[in-house]
Amino acid sequence: MTSSTARVSTDRPARYAKQMADHFGRKITAHWDEGTGQGALIFDNPERPVRGEVSLVAGEGVLLMHLESETEEQCATLEKVVAIHLVRFGRKDELAVRWRRAGGEEGSAWGVEDLD
């Protein structure tokens, strides 16, 4: 298993987490619990080659995302997919996502400047 974590600074972590779960829930298993401030994106669609799970936790001024996947390649793909969606949703707030892999090594980083 490979894992990666991102702490995204935002004044509206629960709003963005819910938006992510609602959006991704059209194609994968996703849920968000407003009461606990926690949810998950479960990439389990048999029609798609990437498998993994991203936990979402809304904290005080931060959205914590923890990703787990089977391979480094899948981890890198999911870092990009999740980050680009979040950055696009939070374009006005200029959200930035910086992933850090297990063991402390840098993962990918995404911001408004990376949007098409």
Image (cartoon, rainbow, N blue to C red):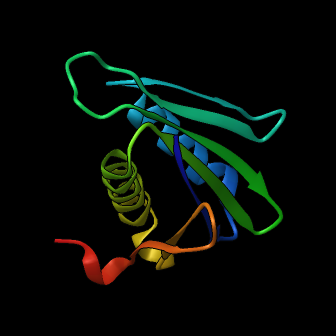
- Of 19 and 77, which appears nearest the observer? 77
* In the depicted structure, whether residue 28 falls above or below residue 9: above
**Residue 91, image quadrant:** bottom left
Percent across and percent down for residue 2 are: 51, 48
| Quadrant occupied by the C terminus | bottom left
**Residue 13, image quadrant:** bottom right
Percent across and percent down for residue 28 are: 38, 24
- Of 59 and 5, which appears nearest the observer? 5
Is 93 situated left or right of 60 in this image?
Answer: left
Is 14 situated left or right of 94 in this image?
Answer: right
Which residue is rendered at x = 37% and y = 31% of the image?
51
* In the depicted structure, whether residue 21 falls above or below residue 104: above
Q: Residue furthest left?
A: 116
* In the depicted structure, whether residue 1 falls above or below residue 4: above
Is 96 situated left or right of 66 in this image?
Answer: left
Q: Residue furthest bottom?
A: 113
Which residue is rendered at x = 33% and y = 45% of the image?
74
Percent across and percent down for residue 32 are: 64, 31
Is 104 situated left or right of 83 in this image?
Answer: right
Which residue is rendered at x = 41% and y = 66% of the image?
87
Percent across and percent down for residue 113 are: 29, 84
